[in-house]
Image (cartoon, coloured by chain):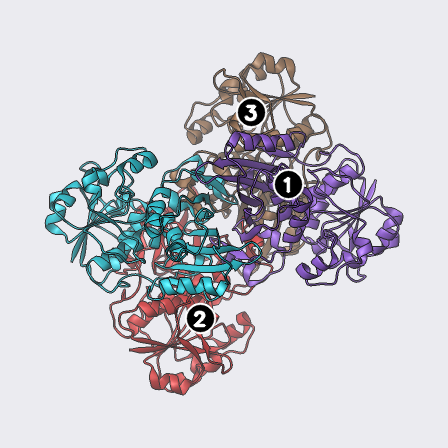
Chain colours: A purple, B cyan, C brown, D red
Amino acid sequence: MQVALVGVTGYSGMVLYRLLKQHPEIDRIQLYGHVGATTVALKTVAAMYQKETAVIRPFDATAIMRDNAIVFFATSAGITRQLALPFIAAHFPVIDLSGDFRLHDPEQYQRWYQRDPAPATALAQASYGLADMPAPLSTYIANPGCYATATLLGLAPLAQQQLVEPTSIVVDAKSGLSGAGKRATAASHYVAVNDNLSLYKLNQHQHIPEMMQQLQQWWSAIPAIEFTTTLIPVTRGIMATIYAKAKSALTTTQVRAAFTATYHEQPFVQVLPTGMPTIKDVVGSNNCVLGVDYNPVTNTIVVVSVIDNLMKGAAGQAVQNFNRYFDFAVTTGLPTLPVFP
Amino acid sequence: MQVALVGVTGYSGMVLYRLLKQHPEIDRIQLYGHVGATTVALKTVAAMYQKETAVIRPFDATAIMRDNAIVFFATSAGITRQLALPFIAAHFPVIDLSGDFRLHDPEQYQRWYQRDPAPATALAQASYGLADMPAPLSTYIANPGCYATATLLGLAPLAQQQLVEPTSIVVDAKSGLSGAGKRATAASHYVAVNDNLSLYKLNQHQHIPEMMQQLQQWWSAIPAIEFTTTLIPVTRGIMATIYAKAKSALTTTQVRAAFTATYHEQPFVQVLPTGMPTIKDVVGSNNCVLGVDYNPVTNTIVVVSVIDNLMKGAAGQAVQNFNRYFDFAVTTGLPTLPVFP
Amino acid sequence: MQVALVGVTGYSGMVLYRLLKQHPEIDRIQLYGHVGATTVALKTVAAMYQKETAVIRPFDATAIMRDNAIVFFATSAGITRQLALPFIAAHFPVIDLSGDFRLHDPEQYQRWYQRDPAPATALAQASYGLADMPAPLSTYIANPGCYATATLLGLAPLAQQQLVEPTSIVVDAKSGLSGAGKRATAASHYVAVNDNLSLYKLNQHQHIPEMMQQLQQWWSAIPAIEFTTTLIPVTRGIMATIYAKAKSALTTTQVRAAFTATYHEQPFVQVLPTGMPTIKDVVGSNNCVLGVDYNPVTNTIVVVSVIDNLMKGAAGQAVQNFNRYFDFAVTTGLPTLPVFP
Amino acid sequence: MQVALVGVTGYSGMVLYRLLKQHPEIDRIQLYGHVGATTVALKTVAAMYQKETAVIRPFDATAIMRDNAIVFFATSAGITRQLALPFIAAHFPVIDLSGDFRLHDPEQYQRWYQRDPAPATALAQASYGLADMPAPLSTYIANPGCYATATLLGLAPLAQQQLVEPTSIVVDAKSGLSGAGKRATAASHYVAVNDNLSLYKLNQHQHIPEMMQQLQQWWSAIPAIEFTTTLIPVTRGIMATIYAKAKSALTTTQVRAAFTATYHEQPFVQVLPTGMPTIKDVVGSNNCVLGVDYNPVTNTIVVVSVIDNLMKGAAGQAVQNFNRYFDFAVTTGLPTLPVFP
C-alpha cells in the first residue's frame, strides 16, 4: 500500500512520517508540500533525517488520488479547508490532523479560529475520529486535537454515565512545548520556558469547542467547562487534571469501575488500579493513562489523563484511525510501551 | 544585632543564611545544628559556600538566648515541638520555618503530620505569620508553609469579601523540586522529574489544615477546599491556579478591584493589570504576583498566584516577619526584583 | 524464536525489553531476575508497563539454555563474571551489556572495576562487539560501554589511518543522567542536576581501559587519551567532543573523506556533510552521527560524536549484535530515525 | 551618586539594573534607550519589574554627562563604537559591556565582528577590565566577554607562570542560553535546546581575539588556542574545561599552588582544594570557581572554570569595575554567595 502525506516539516508531520515508515502495511510514502511547487529533498527540511532521500513534491490532488490509498494532512489550521475539497468530492479517504473539519458548525470555526470555514456541505462529510471511543468513520476523518483527546478520554465515563454535576467541570491542562509548534517566538524561547510555567489562551483555546461538541453529544446537560492551558518546561506530553463535583457521594472504587467499564477493551487506554499517572508513562507511546480519585471531604472527583501530544494527540491517533479505516488490527505499527526513560 | 539560625543545611536554611548575611541590620549570625554536638565548618556541609568559614555549633538554648536577639529555626517537622519550648518559656523571640507551631489544634497536627504535637499551651503562644496579611505578632512566629502562602494570598480577597460559592474552591498547585527537600529518592531522581509531571500527596498534603484554619478565620462558611499538588520540572517556584464559582455574576475588572483593595499597600504583592503571572516573575524575589480572570461562560473566577517557595514561601517571609517584629522597614534586606533570567 | 533477558528493571534492560518486543524475528521473551527466587509480575517492577503481564523468573541457567536461542544480560557490573560461566562452558550465545567481559586482561578489570574479574579462560572466549566496526563475533559478545562506543566511533578513522599525533588526543565527553543509572543519590537529585553541569570520575572512568584496548589494536602508537566525563541536564544522550593535533596539515574535506571511507557502508553511522550534530539528532534511534572539522590555526581536528546512550550505547547495539550473530539484516527491529522532537 | 544605564531590556542590562538598584553607594539610576526618542515606562519593556516605574529616556550624551557620575552601556555590539565617542572626548567614565572597545586592533574587530570598528584613537583610550586580574583602569573600561572571562581566569596562572606547552591549549566551553541573548530563533526555541547540546560558531566565536590579545600579553609564546562553544540546556552559567600539556611533569598539588598564588587575594575567585566546580556553585554570585587536576598518564593539566555569564561574565564584573574605578571596597553591592539552589 502506498500513502500520501501532505506536510512533513512540522512536529506532527515528522512524527507521523516516522510511524508510517515503520508501519508493516505501508510500502511507500509520497510526501507533498502544501505551498508552492519546488521539489526539495526531505533532508533539506528535516535535518534529523540525514540519510532520508525522499523528495517533497508540490501539492497535486489528482496525482495523490491516482497513486495512493489515502492521504494524511499534517498541515496547520486553514490549509485543508481549501486543499481537501477535491478529495471530499471524490470520496477519497483523508485523515486530517488539523482543526479545519472538527467542528460541524461553520460559525463556531469562524469564531474560534478567526478564519473562514470550509463549506458546510464539506464539513458534514467529516467524522470526528476520537479513536479510543470507537464510532463509525466516514472517508473524511478529522483527527481530534491534543488537549481535546486527553480531556475527552478523561471525561467520557463521567459524562456518559452522568456521574457529575454538569456545571462543575474544571480542567487544568498542562502541555509541553511541542504542542505549540515550531515557530520561534518570545514565548517559545528557551529562557522563557525553562524553569517556568505560563498560562496562555485563557478561555480562548480553539480546542474548547470540539470538546463541547463531543461532550454535549454524550450528555446534553453539560453547558460548558472551565478549561485552562499551562505551558510546562517539557518537550512532549499533556496532563489534564480534571475536577468535578460528584452528583451523589460515591467511592474511588466506584469511579474507577466506571472508567474500567468504558475502556476495558481499548488496548491504548489504561486505567490505573492505584495512584496517578505521570507524563513519562506515555511519552513515545500511543497510550492514554488515566488515574482517578474521589475526595469525600469536598465531594470531588479528580481524574488525571496523560497522553503524548504528538502520538495519541496527533500522529499516533491518526495511524490508529488509519488502522480502523482499513480494518487492520488497531495496534498495528503503533507502540504500546513508552520510550522511558 | 546578632541572630541565631538553627539548621542551615537544608534549602530553606541556606537561602535564609544568604538573606541574613546581606541584611543591613544584622551584624553577625550564629549557626547551630539541631542534632548532636559536633562542631563542623560550614563549608563542610554546604559546598557552595567555599569561602565561608562560619562554624556550626551544637544546639544550646541558653547560649542562643544569651548571645542573640532572636532565633530562626530552619529545621524539619518534628524538631521545634521539642527544641523550642525553652524559648517559649522565656518569651524569647522565635521565627519557626517548620510546621510544628502552625496549627492551633494539636489533634490536627497529630493527624496531618503523624507525630506527637507540641503542648497545647505552647501552641497557644504562636502566631501564624502570613506576612502580607499583617496581623499582630507574638514572640513565637510560625512561618507559613509555601503552598499555604501562595494559596492564601490568592484566596484572601475572595474569602474576606465573600465573593465565591464557599464549596466550589479548587486549587491546582504546582511546585518545583526544592519544595520537596534534599532527600534523594526515586521521586527526586533527575530522570523521574525531567520532562515529567507527577501528582503527590493527593488530599493528604500537610499544608491543607493550615490553609483551612486561616480561611475559616476569614470566612467560616468555607467547609473545605479541593487541593492538589503537582511536582514540576523546575528547581524553585510555586504556581497555584485557583478556581471558584462566583456567588453572583461579575467582571474581571471587579475581581481585580477586590484584589487591589486588599493588597495596594503591600510592597511584595503585585496584582497584574492584565494577563497571568509566570513563575519567573518572582524567582529570587520575596514577591507574590497575582493574576485574575472571570469567565462569564462558566461563572468561574480564576486566580493565579506565584511565589518563590524558598523566598516568600520560606526564608524571605521569615525575614519579612523579622522586619515586622523589630519594626524595620518591611523591605529591608529583601529583594523586590526577581533574579530573571 | 524465543530469547531470554536477565535484568529488566534498569534503564538498559527496560529499553532492551521494548526493542525485543518489537523485533519481528522474536516471538517470545523470557524474563529473569538475577537475584533470589521470587516470581514477580513485570508490572510490579516497571510501573510504565502497566498492561504487561510477563513474569520475571528466578535465574536458572539450565532452563534458559533449554528454552531460548540466546540470552541477554542487562545486569550491573559484577554479575555476569559469576552467572555467565555455564553459558560459556556450553558455548551458548550470550550478549552481555555489562563491563565484565570487555577487558581481555583480568588485572585491568580488577584495577578499574575494583572487583575480582572473571577467569582469564572465560574472558578469552569473549569478543568485543563494537557493532559498527564489524569484526567476527564469538558466542560471547561483550557489548561496549556507552562512552566507549561514542568515542571509538569518533576516533576509529583517525587511529586506523594514523592521521593524528598519537599523544595529543583529548575527549571531552558529556552524558545525560540515564547513563548513571537509577540509583537515587545526592548527585542524581533533580536539584543537583537541573541547570547544572558536573564532572565526575576524572581520569577514573571504567570505560577508559576498553577504549585503550581497542585503540591500541587499531594503532599501537597511541599511549593514552585524556578523557573527561561531564554530567549534563539531559535524560538520554552522549556527546563526545574529540580534539587531536593533525600529523600533518590537511583540510576539513580530507578529514571528512577519511570518515566517509570508514563508514559509508554502515547504515547506523552518519557523517555530516557540514556542521556538527546535536544529541537530538540521535535520541531514540540506534544511530551515531559524526561531524568533523579541521582548524588550520591550531592544526587541530575536532570530531563530535553523538549517540543515544541507551540505544547505540547499550540496548540498540545489543540488538544490532543479535542481528549480526544470527545473520538477520542489521537494521531489523532497530529505529534509524530519532524520536524527534 | 547617580549613574546612567544605556540599554536595560537585554539580559545583561536587566541584571545590571538589579545590581545597581541594590548598590549602597548609588542613589539613583537614569535609564536610557539607545534607539529613537520614545519615552516608555520600564514596566512596558521588562515585564518582571511590574512595580518599577522608572522611565527610559531617549539617548542624550550631554544630559548623561551633566546628571551622572558614570555611564554603563549594556548594548549590543555595534552601538558604543558610535554612541560612546562624546564620552571619550570628554574623558567621562564609561563601563561598556559590549565588545566594541575590547580589541586594540581595529582590523581584528572588523574581522571578528564583521562591522566597522571604532576609531583607532578611541580604541587606544580603552582598558580591558578583567576585574580579578587587577590592572590600572582608564576612564573607558571595556568589560570582558563572558567566555573570555571564564577562560582567561582559568588560563592566567598557566600562562603567566609558563607551565604548559603553549601550542597545546584546548578549551571546551559550555554556556547556558542567556549567553546567546533574547532573540527568538530556531536555535533558541525550547524544543531545540531542551534535552540537547549543540556546538556553534566553531572557530569563529568573537571572544577568541580578546582572549588571544590578553594571553599573548601574559605570554607571547602562545600562538593560538583551540576554543569550542557548546550550548547547554541551562539558563545561566558557563563552564570552561581547559586542557593543556604540562611543560614538565608536575603534580595536582603544584598546579593548585600556582592558582592559589595568583588568586589568594581575590575575594571573588575560589580555587577548590579538591574536586571540580559545578555551574551552580556560582549562579547568582559574582564568583569564579576553579578546580584543577594533573593527569600523569597523559601529562595533561585540566582546569575547570565556572562563572555566571550574566554576573561575573557581564553585569557583576561591570559593578566590580565600577567599585574599582571609584575605589569602593571591591565586594560592595556584589553577592559572594550563589543563589543556590
Q: Which residue is mark 3?
A: C42
> Residues at marks 2 and 1, common chain?
no
Q: Work out whether D38 lies above or below B7.
A: below
Q: Secondary structure at mark 3?
A: helix
**CA neighbours of label 2 inside 10 A, class few (<14), some (14 to 19), many (20+):** some
Residue C47 in percent (x, y) is at 53, 31
- Crowding near the residue tagged with mark 3, few <14, some 14–19, many ≥20 C-alpha atoms within 10 Å: many
Question: Identity of the amino acid at label 2?
Answer: Lys
The amino acid type found where label 3 is placed reads Leu
Q: Which of the 4 image quadrants contains residue D274?
A: top left
Please indicate, yes or no, whether residue D41 appears anywhere in the rendered image: yes
The numbered mark, 3 or 1, whose residue comes first in the sequence reads 3
* Marks 3/1: CA–CA distance: 25 Å
Instruction: Find residue B17 and report its horizontal and vertical position in percent.
Output: 26, 52
Local crowd size for mark 1, using a 10 Å CA cut-off: few (<14), some (14–19), many (≥20): many
In front of the other: B158 or C200 = B158
Residue D251 visible? The answer is: no
For the residues tagged 3 and 1, is the chain the same?
yes
The tag on residue C51 is none
Camera-near label (3 vs 1) is 3
Residue under label 1, please give it.
C285
